[in-house]
Image (cartoon, rainbow, N blue to C red):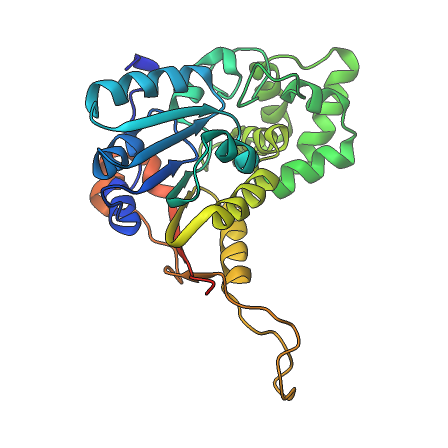
Amino acid sequence: MTAEYRHVPVMLEEVLAELDPQSGEIVCDCTLGGAGHTVELARRVAPEGLSIGIDQDDMALGAAARRLEREAPEADAIQLKGNFGDLDDLLLRAEVPGVDCFLFDLGVSSPQLDIPERGFSYNEDAPLDMRMNSGNDTITAAEVVNTRNEADLTRILRVYGDERYASRIAREIVRRREERPIETTLQLVDAVKAAIPAAARRHGGHPARRTFQALRIEVNQELDVLDRGLRAAIRWANPGGRICVISYHSLEDRIVKHVFTELSRGCTCPPDLPVCVCGNVPIVEVRTRRPLVASDEEVAANPRSRSALMRVAVKLDAS
């Protein structure tokens, strides 16, 4: 395991308890990362089962493959490069009939934050990139910052970052880019700091945290990808299959809750109709009406787990 991908999986015991992988089953970790969750899932379905790991980061895929070979050599495991928003195509490539356990551990991984040249960190100077798959010829954070108008920047910061000073930050970005393009992370940090009142900068963590979160979500279209990938996972889940999602902010959690609630709903006809005409039947059963959270002990040992929210659903038998 490379140093870059040594990290502690969040809510591991809860994941194993809720997914309850059994020998011979097929499990799919849609956010492979350092394979912290996947190693334990793979061990439990081995040797007859199959572990699938999906990630769009080449470094993560390589590190995960080495870790699985070392720590779960008995497991049948494959790694697929891609975005879980394209889950249909990825699982067709894996040639599996269905999946028994799906895991989504959302958000940017700690190793990606720690590699300055990826442009996710507001503590290191680097090109303003923020693409999860830096090899893709897609828009970067620098392009968003330097091409979107003030109203659109305000919307991105307010909606995706819940940034109180969104309009002030957008105005400052537009003013500065007229003088020269904003191309690095610390140029953006300086613009954010200049826009936020001094008193507000002294509280609530790093003043650029929400701006960087908002741009990362916009660059990677994370919310659209989550909705698409989660619906695909539910389609591919076998009857009785478990779908577990760990999110780290309210926007993600809201999408998970909405999809689970929508697909767990049965007939939506008015109660005075004598027979159902909508044809809606529940597809999943929601196991967590309220999200599970990390224990106090885990939060103390792994601060990243503090904001984690876990929701779980079970695929129903259509017959």
Task: Identify which residue is drawn at 34% across, 40% down.
Answer: 26
Looking at the picture, tell me which residue is in the foreground, 223 or 40: 40
Task: Give the vertical position of 80 relative to 151 (above or below).
Answer: above
- 214 left or right of 61 in image: right
Total marks in image? 0
User: Looking at the image, can residue 9 be seen?
Assistant: no
Q: Who's the residue at 30% across and 43% down the image?
A: 25
Image quarter (top left, top right, bottom left or bottom right) of the N terminus:
top left
Indicate the position of residue 95 as horizontal and vertical percent values.
46, 33
Residue beneath the point at 79% across and 29% down: 149
- In the displayed structure, would residue 106 be above or below residue 277? above
Residue shown at the point (29%, 20%) measured from the top left:
6
Whether residue 153 sits left or right of residue 117 in the image: it is right
Determine which quarter of the picture holds residue 104. Answer: top left
* Snapshot quadrant of residue 192: top right
Q: Position of residue 62 (x, y in %)?
A: 37, 15
Residue 271 percent across, percent down from the top left: 61, 85
Q: Is residue 120 visible?
A: yes
Give the x, y percent position of residue 181: 72, 12
